[in-house]
Image (cartoon, rainbow, N blue to C red):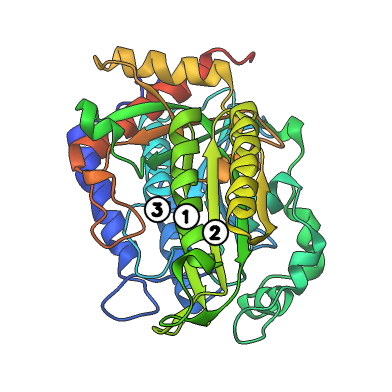
Amino acid sequence: MSPAPRLEAATAGEALLARCDALAALTEEPGRLTRTYLTPRHAEANALVAEWMTAAGMAVRVDPLGNLIGRYEGARPGAPAVVIGSHLDTVRDAGRYDGMLGVVTGIAVVEALHRAGRRLPVAVEVTGFGDEEGVRFGATLIGSRALAGTLDAAVLDTPDRDGIPLRDALAAFGCDPARWQQAARRPEELRAYLEVHIEQGPELERLGLPVGVVTAIAGATRRAVTLTGMAGHAGTVPMDGRRDALAGAAEAVLAVEAVGRDHGVVATVGRIEALPGAVNVIPGAARFTIDLRAADDAARAAALADLDDTLAAVAARRGLGLAQEPLHENAATPCDPALMAAFAAAVARAGLPVHRLMSGAGHDAMAMAAVTPVAMLFVRCAGGISHNPAESITAADAGTAAAVLLDTLLQLAEDTPG
């Protein structure tokens, strides 16, 4: 009988961080990490990760959307797969763990199985999604939506800032865009999707915990708001006769903050602009964005309804026009209860308190939920900082996450009929 697969957290953590460092060296911009979809640096990242996958005993392929997939076959060929994945693309001037940590952690788990000569009742697939961030083509989750079978064909005609459509970029990358639908997986081919990811927030650090079990990925509403008043001379229009759009926007921004607090959701104004934008002109128009997120769609809807009433009242009281343009709408993605329980049990067996938390950021798991049950494990990151070169985790925490993931995988395999 083959020995039980083992993964020493301390040793594994150092190796995981070293691999993230190696991937961070593959950048389009000297001095800062930027690796966008279907670029030469993306190809180099796929090649490097493919080497690690092959050494871990996986059969490796690149699908028609440029996703890198390594498969460690189960005891029975063709068995449904537990997919472990995350993304290999980055934002501009990125940190080195967002996305990449999840891919290399999956490889570490398969390496442990391979060393022990262990085949499970399920196959294990590690996927490095080509695009999650949406930097190059503006559409997020391209890789995982293709795999889940929910990618809109219109995305293939979306150009990058140089005017290159996605379908042409795929062809230049060596993929066949005519076969894009063949990237989709059928539900019966999959057992589950598991993703390890840095938290991108401060909660685990505040609690002194290395890992946490994600309950849901927040749904999000984004809008562009325009308030229209009357521009005028800053020195001649009396205060009681003004229709100052920026002053109205200032009140609206505070209303967004208050709605977030009152409804237990997160609400942000990330961009604001005054027009015409001269120092001596009363702003005749103001534009700003709203980003509102919640793990509970009902709570998000209630917050939006409250906010709509407040914005309308601000505009009416100040004599301003109000227009709102929808930018993005995405429902919350709850994690699968059984998979959450499996992660929680593995965390407890590691001798750690089990903490559950939601994800305010989007992840590939959102797309994968359309085709298979999903769950996520968060890893503590310093200061909650992400999408920033200051992104930082410890080897100990990375190793703990890898050990918990391996334990969870083995439990899922044990619960799978042979």
Q: Are marks 3 and 2 in contact (CB under 8 Å)?
A: no
Kindly identify the residue that appears in the image at 43 percent across and 80 percent down: 234
Label 2 SS: strand
Kindly identify the residue that appears in the image at 25 percent across and 17 percent down: 352
The answer to which of marks 3 and 2 sits earlier in the sequence is 3
Count residues near mark 1 (Cα–Cα under 10 Å), then give few for <14, some for 14-19, many for 20+.
Answer: some
Kindly identify the residue that appears in the image at 47 percent across and 29 percent down: 262
State how far apart marks 3 and 2 are (Cα).
30 Å
The answer to which of marks 2 and 1 sits earlier in the sequence is 1
Count residues near mark 3 (Cα–Cα under 10 Å), then give few for <14, some for 14-19, many for 20+.
Answer: many
- Which x, y percent locates residue 143? 62, 56
Mark 1, residue position: 269
Q: Which mark is residue 376?
A: none
* Residue 87 visible in the shown view: yes
Count residues near mark 2 (Cα–Cα under 10 Å), then give few for <14, some for 14-19, many for 20+.
Answer: many
Which amino acid is tagged 2?
Answer: Thr
Along the viewing direction, whichever of 73 and 171 lies nearer the viewer: 171
Mark 3, residue position: 100
- Which x, y percent locates residue 18? 24, 54
Mark 2, residue position: 289
Which amino acid is tagged 1?
Answer: Val
Q: Are marks 3 and 1 in contact (CB under 8 Å)?
A: no
Along the viewing direction, whichever of 158 and 123 lies nearer the viewer: 158
State how far apart marks 2 and 1 are (Cα).
5 Å
Label 3 SS: helix
Label 1 SS: loop
- Which x, y percent locates residue 297? 63, 31
Along the viewing direction, whichever of 55 and 216 lies nearer the viewer: 216
Which amino acid is tagged 3?
Answer: Met
Kindly identify the residue that appears in the image at 70 percent across and 53 percent down: 146
